[in-house]
Amino acid sequence: MVAVEQVSSMFDTILVLDFGSQYSHLLTRRLREYNVYAEMLPCTQKISELGWKPKGVILSGGPYSVYDADAPHVDHDVFELGVPILGICYGMQELAWINGKQVGRGEKREYGPATLNVLNHASPLFKDVDHSTVWMSHGDKLNSLPTGFEVIATSDNSPYCGIANESKNIYGIQFHPEVTHSTKGKTMLKNFAVDICKAKQNWSMENFIDSEIKRIRELVGPTAEVIGAVSGGVDSTVASKLMTEAIGDRFHAILVDNGVLRLNEAENVKKTLIDGLGINLTVIDAADEFLDNLKGVTDPEKKRKIIGNTFIRVFEREAEKIKPKDGSNVEFLLQGTLYPDVIESISFKGPSQTIKTHHNVGGLLDDMKLKLIEPLRELFKDEVRHLGELLGISHELVWRHPFPGPGIAIRVLGEVTREQVEIARKADFIYIEEIRKAGLYDKISQAFACLLPVKTVGVQGDNRIYDQVIALRAIETTDFMTADWFPFEHSFLKKVSTRIVNEVDGVARVTYDITSKPPATVEWE
Ligand SMILES: Nc1ncnc2c1ncn2[C@@H]1O[C@H](COP(=O)(O)OP(=O)(O)OP(=O)(O)O)[C@@H](O)[C@H]1O
Ligand SMILES: O=c1[nH]c(=O)c2[nH+]cn([C@@H]3O[C@H](COP(=O)(O)O)[C@@H](O)[C@H]3O)c2[nH]1
Ligand SMILES: NC(=O)CC[C@H](N)C(=O)O
Ligand SMILES: [Mg+2]
């Protein structure tokens, strides 16, 4: 097989070695905002196994103390690369530890703002940086200066706030330039990457499209075929469009209609992807199979499991039927993995507690023995959206609210039946339609209707009714880890409530969910 270049070989790359700081990924974010490509790897990365040469290396902060017996340490080969190095907080302490072990616990811990006192204005790290505010978060400190270094900045509490060995191009700072509270932090990161490391500022989605299409073509070769599960969400659509640009109809997209998609969803996705984007898509109607398997099940995690398993079975069955024209087998599977997923899996810290087992099609690969293609694995969500727009995908699709794999099955509380799904679907459709009409769709991160398994009395047209309750949810969030409920005008809620009760049979009342996350989650199940 041809050796395929990695993105990090195609663009000048700053390597961020992660020691577990909660801010580490922001270092890559900030550099990319300056069109410098940056990639994060665990601090334990062996430099000899890297396979590409970075233009510079950043050692991140971290929760450990360098003098602890089990503290993580960088591979010393990093100093043999001959490229500039910047240590941040733990990263700076690591530089000092390697060079004389002069690090100890400080008398005072320092969290929050401090004023940077620049001593060496000629230092390239401080170009356009004055006595600005910097953000501190540490308990340890340097006891003395490592050999060959000079102090380039101080703060009230940190006599070694900035240190440099300019002949070797090694820098250390005690504060966190990657957080916005460090007012000139971004400038310092740019100074490091562009002026000190001489990294080219050519990372852009336009350049990424060309290099990625080339990379996919090399990887897949002239004849192999690729399949992919496509949901109509942003990630899988953007990945599919990129595949289509690269290899045309040798990419086979499959949308599984699991019977719990939104109203007219399968039809709409089909139209948008096939007619609008020229993607070779097959829609599989497996609604009966999913709904049969869900019969009698009320436990949310069981629903997820059943849907996940059924999904895998359906997908594999359909994939078998897709036979390339030359009689060979499909060789590759496309997945829309994003960079945050990659970061999570390489994070130096262990995984956080599972609240819900978010299912997707991650389980497919082991059994299917297909090679994986993940064209978005270097990208953040906003980069994927930008890429989607450049590939000609509509604003509406690119800015779609996320929709969970188990779909309406986790929005119909209790048992999932065709009738219950229909009620939730219709209410959801009206709600989203009104949100769009009011010009609120892009202001809200996610909105949907849930059907509650509760019966309640009402009066309609002088008749007593005894029907169910729709709960409306709308949240604002940046990362979906925490969220606030959206403050609709009362008149908006009134209009939606009236429409749902009037137009959807089976609904007696409408309520609005005013719980943030935490303590609630976004979905009700
Ligand atoms: N009904 C479906 N048919 C086929 N594939 C699906 C379906 N639902 C989910 N998937 C697969 O599961 C993956 C994960 O879903 P997820 O919702 O996280 O991503 P997405 O739908 O591509 O984008 P977004 O996060 O914007 O919704 C999808 O990328 C797709 O490959
Ligand atoms: O693909 C998915 N499979 C799932 O099982 C699932 N459960 C929740 N979600 C989505 O994740 C985000 C956070 O939701 P929660 O606060 O409910 O965990 C929200 O965007 C939810 O819609 C899921 N997505
Ligand atoms: N934010 C950090 O990198 C902290 C480093 C180290 N744990 C300290 O307390 O000093
Ligand atoms: Mg989705």
Image: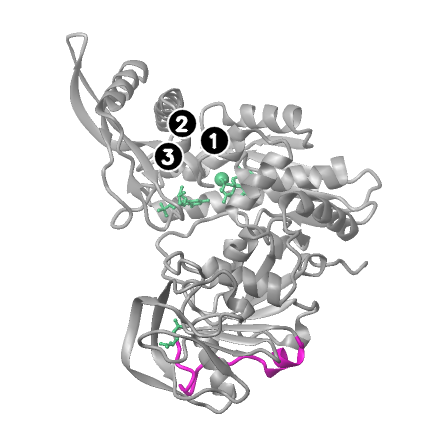
Q: Nearer the viewer, residue 506 or 290?
A: 506
Crowd tier of the residue under label 1, counting other residues whose Cα lies within 10 Å: few below 14, some 14–19, many 20 or above: many
Q: Nearer the viewer, residue 500 or 14?
A: 14
Secondary structure at badge 2 equals helix
Q: Residue at x 39, y 19 (%)?
A: 437
How far apart are the two marked residues, 2 and 3, measured between alpha carbons? 29 Å
* Image region (quadrant) for ligand 3: bottom left
Quick check: 239 above or below 429?
Answer: below
Give left or right: position of 424 versus 172.
left
Give left or right: position of 100 versus 68.
right
How far apart are the two marked residues, 3 and 1, measured between alpha carbons? 26 Å
The kind of secondary structure the magenta stretch mainly shows is loop
Answer whether labels 1 and 2 touch (C-beta < 8 Å).
yes
User: How many numbered dots are placed on residues in this image?
Assistant: 3
Q: Residue at x 38, y 33 (%)?
A: 443
Disc 3: which residue: 444
Residues shaded magenta: 64-82
Disc 1: which residue: 259
Name the amino acid type tagged 1: Gly
Q: Residue at x 54, y 54 (%)?
A: 339
Give left or right: position of 289 versus 433.
right
Quick check: 322 above or below 45?
Answer: above
Disc 2: which residue: 418
Name the amino acid type tagged 2: Arg
